[in-house]
Image: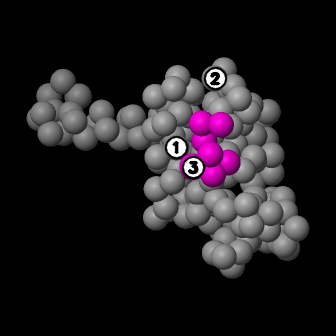
Amino acid sequence: MSVGTLSKEQAAAVAYFEQKLAFEIGPVGLKMALEKGEKFQIVDLRTPELYAKGHIPGAINILFENLDENLSKLSKDTTTVVYCYDVLCHLATRVALELAKKGYKVQELHGGFDGWADHQFQIEGKAHKAGSCGTSCA
């Protein structure tokens, strides 16, 4: 079945999922892109305490309520990947929306920090071991 023969509802679903994929990145996709040398600015939206315990390498910590005063730390020319706690947290979605409204290229890390940690990818911070930090940081 071609896209041209889809019902209105089916075409809307195709458009939705195409857009979703364009503005989300999974932990594996982010890791692979970083390993290939792709440039991102990564923003951790969790509390400073959890950020200090463990975060994605290179991420900066910005709280939602302090976003506007920290915009100077971000470039509109580099894709910003935002993440919060886990797949149920909507802080990253809210910040991604705000950044997009301000003209930033932005993607949300699907699964948040826990998604990254669950894959046992590298974590920077003072309270983690070589594996996951995930919800155990809480």
Which residue is label 2 attached to? 76
Cβ atoms at labels 1 and 3 below 8 Å apart:
yes
The amino acid type, in three-letter code, at marker 2 is Lys
What is the crowding at mark 3: few (fewer than 14 residues within 10 Å), some, or many (at least 20)? some
Give the residues in magenta. 62-69
Count the marks.
3
Residue 56: quarter of image: bottom right
Q: Which is more toward the observer, 10 or 137?
A: 137
Q: Residue at x 12, y 33 (%)?
A: 8
Q: Is 95 situated above or below 15?
A: below
Of circles 3 and 2, which is in front? Answer: 3
Residue 74: quarter of image: top right
The quadrant in which the N terminus is found is top left
Secondary structure under tag 2 reads: loop
Counting from the top left corner in percent of width and height, residue 22 is at 47, 34
Secondary structure under tag 1 reads: helix
The amino acid type, in three-letter code, at marker 3 is Phe
Residue sitting at the far right: 126
Which residue is label 3 attached to? 64
